[in-house]
Image (cartoon, helix red, strand yellow):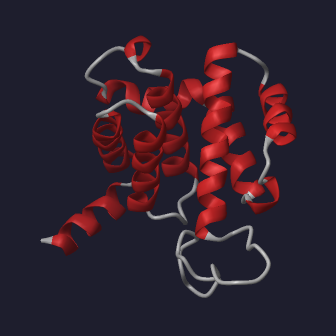
């Protein structure tokens, strides 16, 4: 990549699908959300959830598969650790979160913690879009607030620099 972050729209023109394009990364996040949601509700093993999603997904070839697997396995495999990052910032107990909010917070926190090459604002914006698309009416506002505070804890230098440049 030529110095652009992985979520920039470069390469999204005509021709063969680019598995690292912005849309391919969004599809990966959506598929990972489905998987974490499924895992939260069913309690099935991570590998079972992954196999099911891969078998059922119609556009797996248009998905950033590497990101999908990383997010799914990271969010499920480190769920307790990730919850420890955002649970103190919640206005209600984890048990009262909708499964969608819970899954998005796990995915967003994993990405903030482990995908340092993706700017924190991109992680938060993608989580907000997932919440708007799949969550309740104001779920995106809740997700935004929690992940913004989580980012300030996990990436303090990046957040401080961004806030300083805005004003």
Which picture quadrant has residue 2? bottom right
- Residues 144 and 152: in front is 144
Q: Residue at x 67, y 24 (%)?
A: 38
| Up/down of 31 relative to 46, above or below | below
Dividing the image into 4 quarters, which one contains the N terminus? bottom right
Q: Is residue 65 left or right of residue 21?
A: right
**Farthest bottom residue in view:** 2
Q: Residue at x 35, y 14 (%)?
A: 93
Q: Is residue 85 left or right of residue 111?
A: left
Q: Is residue 91 left or right of residue 13?
A: left
Residue 107, image x and y in percent?
55, 40
Residue 147, image x and y in percent?
36, 43
Q: Residue at x 56, y 23 (%)?
A: 80
**Farthest left residue in view:** 167
| Up/down of 7 relative to 44, above or below | below
| Up/down of 20 relative to 58, above or below | below
Q: Residue at x 38, y 25 (%)?
A: 87
Dividing the image into 4 quarters, which one contains the C terminus? bottom left
| Up/down of 125 relative to 146, above or below | below
Q: How many marks?
A: 0
Q: Is residue 36 left or right of residue 64?
A: left
Residue 23, image x and y in percent?
61, 64
Which picture quadrant has residue 117? bottom right
């Amino acid at each position: 990549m030529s110095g652009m972050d992985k979520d920039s729209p470069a390469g999204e023109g005509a021709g063969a699908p680019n598995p690292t394009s912005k849309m391919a990364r969004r599809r990966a996040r959506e598929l990972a959300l489905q998987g974490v949601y499924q895992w939260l509700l069913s309690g099935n093993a991570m590998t079972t959830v992954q196999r099911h999603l891969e078998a059922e997904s119609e556009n797996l070839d248009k998905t950033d598969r590497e990101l999908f697997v990383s997010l799914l396995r990271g969010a499920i495999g480190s769920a307790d650790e990730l919850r420890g990052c955002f649970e103190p910032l919640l206005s209600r107990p984890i048990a009262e979160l909708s499964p969608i909010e819970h899954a998005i917070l796990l995915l967003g926190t994993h990405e903030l913690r482990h995908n340092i090459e993706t700017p924190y604002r991109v992680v938060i914006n993608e989580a907000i879009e997932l919440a708007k698309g799949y969550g309740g009416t104001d779920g995106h506002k809740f997700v935004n607030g929690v992940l913004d505070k989580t980012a300030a804890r996990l990436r303090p230098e990046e957040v401080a620099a961004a806030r300083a440049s805005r004003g």
